[in-house]
Amino acid sequence: MKAHAEKEPVWSEAALDAYLANPRKAVKGTRMSFAGLRKEKDRHDVIEYMKQASK
């Protein structure tokens, strides 16, 4: 994650969506036990929540 953050310190919605869908594929070397959110609506809801919470 640190190497990824150095390369891309700000996450776009598309990058966050890809990460939430499949963390291991989106960020090489990630060893999270979280497999990802398969449903597009679930990922959208998480991203919208994060946008609102960060205001």
Image: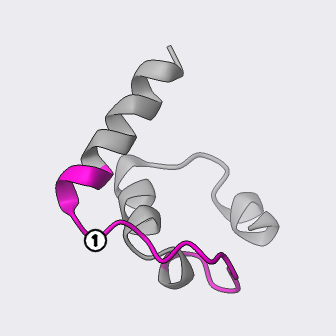
Give the prevailing secondary structure in the magenta stretch.
loop
Q: Quadrant of the N terminus?
A: bottom right
Pick the front one: 11 or 42: 42
Magenta residues span 26-43
Dot 1, how many residues are within 10 Å of its Cα: few (below 14), some (14-19), or many (20+)? few
User: Dividing the picture into quarters, in which one does residue 31 lie?
Assistant: bottom right
Q: What residue type is labelled 1?
A: Arg
- SS for callout 1: loop
Place of residue 10 in the rendered image (x, y in percent of width and height, measured from the top left): 59, 46
From the image, tell me which residue sits under label 1.
38
**Could you tell me which residue is drawn at 41 percent across and 20 percent down?**
52
Q: Is residue 49 above or below residue 43?
A: above
Position of residue 51 measured from the top left corner of the image (x, y, whole percent): 42, 28
The residue lying at 43 percent from left, 71 percent from top is: 36
Residue drawn where x is 33% and y is 33% of the image: 48
Query: Which percent across, then down, holds residue 43?
Result: 31, 53
Q: Quick check: 23 above or below 54?
A: below
